Image (tube, rainbow, N blue to C red):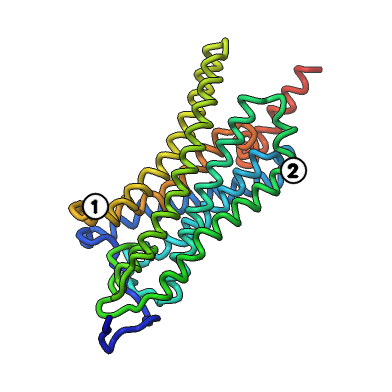
Amino acid sequence: MLHSNNTQFHPSSFLLMGIPGLEHVHIWIGFPFFAVYMIALLDNITILFVIQTERSLHQPMFYFLAMLATTDLGLSTATIPKMLGIFWFNLKEIVFGACITQMYTIHICTGLESVVLTVMAIDRYVAICNPLRYSMILTNKVIVILGIYIILRTLVFVTPFIFLILRLPFCGVRIIPHTYCEHMGLAKLACASIRVNVIYGLVAFSVGYIDLSVIGFSYAQILWAVFRLPSWDTRLKALSTCGSHVCVILAFYLPALFSFMTHRFGHNIPQYIHILLANLYVVVPPALNPVIYGVRTKQIRERVLRMINPKNHLHLSTRCTTIVQ
């Protein structure tokens, strides 16, 4: 294939256009994004602080929750500040290296989030369906092995995206109709065949289907165990918790699936809908996860309340001690 004289393998920069078709409301769209980012930062940092300082929380479930909080901080910080720069200050230009770095960080974080959610579902399955063997199955050694697996699997599947982009020549217009850099959005700007990128993207995304299948199996087993409980109150409490977890999982996977499919097959879908939904799965889960997995967890909720109002907690503790005596 012959390329024009302005063909470059490493162009100096790209232009991120934000949400095409909604440019006139960019400034207003920025406010909810900013609010969600503040919630994600505050909630996830709080959860990490509580887990680190509270020795009673040094357990498998909370280690996984700390992994999820760290991933959420990385995902939201890799995307939202640049979005706000586009929405509020019209800072659309992004240099090539920064674009590749953002692409890699986003795919790393979404890959980590997928496998961490899977491991957390397995953890809940073992805790509810095999409670007597929980401490024997999820030992510290197993936690370390799972942590290494989570990181290595993500690196193995995401790192090739960098080389698949670096091999492509770019020519002509370097405008990305999006709020952040991601693999297929960059690949479509190349003036060469991107068949390998498309095929590998399908392979990498299929790993998410495996994760989703494991999550579905785990929660199906959990529900089966819950419906065999004798007490209706216990059933409703367990169903409420499972329902919240399922909502978090759907909030992450459904927009990701929609974004992936529309990139390849959804040519008749308005572009602004595609971009908005693509933003949902990198913006909403980091703010939603700590609320569902953290605040609704009794041990973390009590520790946070103790941090917010230590005098009231001390008064209640003293009162309880007096009653016991």
| Quadrant including the C terminus | top right
- Which residue is pictured at 69% across the width and 48% down the height? 145
* Pick the front one: 138 or 316: 138
Residue occupying the far left of the picture: 268
Residue 94 image offset from top left, x and y in percent: 38, 74
- Which residue is pictured at 72% across the width and 41% down the height? 58
Give the side of residue 287 with respect to residue 135, left or right: left
Residue occupying the far top of the picture: 230
- Which residue is pictured at 30% across the width and 67% down the height? 188
As shown in the figure, which amino acid type bears the numbered disc 2? Asn
Residue 35 image offset from top left, x and y in percent: 41, 51
Residue 262 image offset from top left, x and y in percent: 28, 52
Q: Secondary structure at mark 2?
A: helix
* Pick the front one: 199 or 133: 199
Of callouts 2 and 1, the N-terminal one = 2
Q: Secondary structure at mark 1?
A: loop
User: Which residue position holds label 1?
Assistant: 266
Residue 39 image offset from top left, x and y in percent: 47, 49
As shown in the figure, which amino acid type bears the numbered disc 1? Gly
Does 192 appear above or below 67?
Answer: below
Does 69 appear above or below 95?
Answer: above
User: Which residue position holds label 2?
Assistant: 140
Give the side of residue 203 with respect to residue 307, left or right: left
